[in-house]
Amino acid sequence: MKRKTTRPAFVTTLAVMMIALVAVALAALTTRLGTAARQATAAREQAQVEQLVLVGLQIAAQQTGDVDQNIPLPEELVEAGAKLKVTIRAKHVAIEAQYGRARTLQE
């Protein structure tokens, strides 16, 4: 009776290749999700900065004379790294707003 020879090296190689394929797909998916999360965070921070600039414009419209003032913000915003500064010099208005990593200077 003849015995069939099996190819264990082929099966092992095929299994390793399938595991590698799954690992690459998982890494690509993780990277894509991480990128989407960073983009969402950046968009949220930028929207908050724009809101702070609008508040700064309203405050600047109410001021008379030269002003260099840090505007007090709610504690929740301060904890998130928010800052708002309004500067008025000779009818020139500058509003500096920051939230998280997003920052802008509106003149």
Image (cartoon, rainbow, N blue to C red):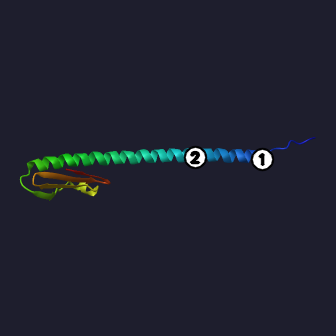
User: Residue farthest to the right?
Assistant: 1
Query: Residue 31, image x and y in percent?
Result: 49, 47
Quadrant of the drawing holding the N terminus: top right
* 12 left or right, relative to 77: right
Q: Residue at x 54, y 48 (%)?
A: 27
Q: Residue at x 42, y 44 (%)?
A: 36
Q: Secondary structure at mark 1?
A: helix
Q: Residue at x 15, y 51 (%)?
A: 93
Q: In the rendered image, which residue does mark 1 sit on? A: 8
Question: Disc number at residue 24?
Answer: 2
Q: Quadrant of residue 81?
A: bottom left
Q: Residue at x 85, y 44 (%)?
A: 5
Q: Say which amino acid is labelled 2.
A: Val
Report the Cα–Cα distance between label 2 and label 1.
24 Å
Verify CB contact (< 8 Å) between mark 2 and mark 1: no
Q: Nearer the viewer, residue 27 or 103?
A: 103
Query: Residue 6, image x and y in percent?
Result: 82, 44
User: Residue farthest to the left?
Assistant: 64
Q: Nearer the viewer, residue 90 or 63?
A: 90
Q: Say which amino acid is labelled 1.
A: Pro
Pointer 2: residues within 10 angstroms few (<14), some, or many (20+)?
few
Q: Between disc 2 and disc 1, whose residue precedes?
A: 1
Query: Residue 102, image x and y in percent?
Result: 30, 52
* 64 left or right, relative to 32: left
Pointer 1: residues within 10 angstroms few (<14), some, or many (20+)?
few
- Which mark is nearer the camera, 2 or 1? 2
Q: Secondary structure at mark 2?
A: helix
Question: Disc number at residue 81?
Answer: none
Looking at the rendered structure, the number of numbered marks drawn on it comes to 2
